[in-house]
Image (cartoon, rainbow, N blue to C red):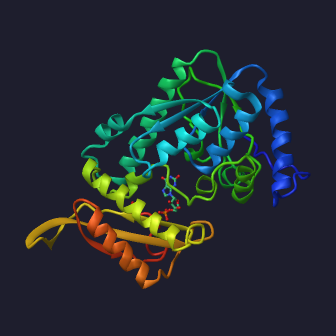
Amino acid sequence: MEKQLRPENLKRITTLEMAEAFIQEQIKEIKQQVREDKVLLALSGGVDSSVVAALLIKAIGTNLVCVHVNHGLLRKGEPEQVVKVFREELGANLIYVDAVDRFLDKLAGVDEPEQKRKIIGAEFIEVFADEARKQDGIKFLAQGTIYPDILESDGVKAHHNVGGLPEDLKFELVEPVKFLYKDEVRIVGKALGLPDNMVYRQPFPGPGLGVRCVGAITRDRLEAVRESDAILREEFANAGLEGKVWQYFTVVPDFKSTGIKDNKRTYEWPVVLRAVNSVDATAASIEEIPYKLLHKITERILKEVKGVNRVLYDLSPKPVATIEWE
Ligand code: XMP
């Protein structure tokens, strides 16, 4: 298939005014394309799908059917924020699917990283397809494809679409931000009134916390990843580092070490802190976190996160390490 290239007359969006003009133009185009028909969208809460959702809500209101799949591997507060912003504030027609047990049961005992990714991807398609089949009269599928996805691959990167939907679910695509770069998508999101922590959020892998709960995922260790990540993010925000450091998160490996709590020996997990700077994720350097901040985060994690008795800081750049641990 021939690659579609960005139209020459589409100027780089650098201001809110330019974003406004883009939004008006897209609303017109979306209305022309879909008319009175229904559009389905997998809404993860990431920047791209959120911007596409907000655009389509403006254009066609409740004829957009958003499906948010909670696979249990999202960060603390994310599913709640999607419901709050889209259903309560923007009036979206939003289907919230609690698929936590379904995913975690399938993943139980699976420790091979690529196998974990495959299960998460395949299960996502299945859950989304199940929801799609329950809907009547859907003709279109909206996707948060962005321009780098088109440039980087022959088709579209797997994590940005629900490609691989079964044969009976072939829809015409609606991809309103497919010619935009990430920074432009963020400005459009800002102009659409989406919250800053949605618009400026750090990259987050499709398999979510699943690749940070190293080895076979268990519910208790996954909770340790989620809670420690929330503490790290909160403390980075308090220190004014939000939006300044490219990516920061915690990892919990599947081994334990001894410690001491209330005069008793413990045998618990370590939490690894990771904070990297990068331009495009192909290489990454280590962010120099102030020592005081590291201490504060360590203290809070040791006090607040169940099952953890040690905190480590990962100093490995990419290469030789990758950004994620799996
Ligand atoms: P690595 O670990 O390969 O990560 O250095 C590079 C960037 O890609 C993100 N990442 C993923 N994103 N699906 C995604 O959508 C994935 O399976 C995946 N694995 C890694 C990672 O967070 C980093 O920003």
Tell me if 134 is positioned left or right of 59 in this view. left
Along the line of sight, which residue is nearer the eye, 129 or 303? 303
**Whether residue 291 is situated above or below residue 199 in the rendered picture:** below
Residue 325 in view in this figure: no
Quadrant (top left, top right, bottom left, bottom right) of the C terminus? bottom left
Q: Position of residue 126 (x, y in %)?
A: 45, 30
- Residue 151 percent across, percent down from the top left: 71, 54
Tell me where residue 13 appears, x and y as whole percent.
82, 57
Q: Measuring 48% from the left and 48% from the top, which residue is drawn there?
A: 78
Nearest the eye: 20 or 248: 20
Quadrant of the image occupied by residue 256: bottom left
Residue closest to the eye, 301 or 4? 301
Above or below, 243 against 6 in this view is: below
Kindly give the residue lying farthest to the right in the view shown: 9
The residue drawn where x is 30% and y is 57% is 224
Residue 12 in picture, x, y percent from top left: 83, 58
Above or below, 15 against 290 in this view is above
Residue closest to the eye, 3 or 159: 159
Left or right of 287 on screen, residue 271: left
User: Residue at point 62% right, 50% down?
Assistant: 47
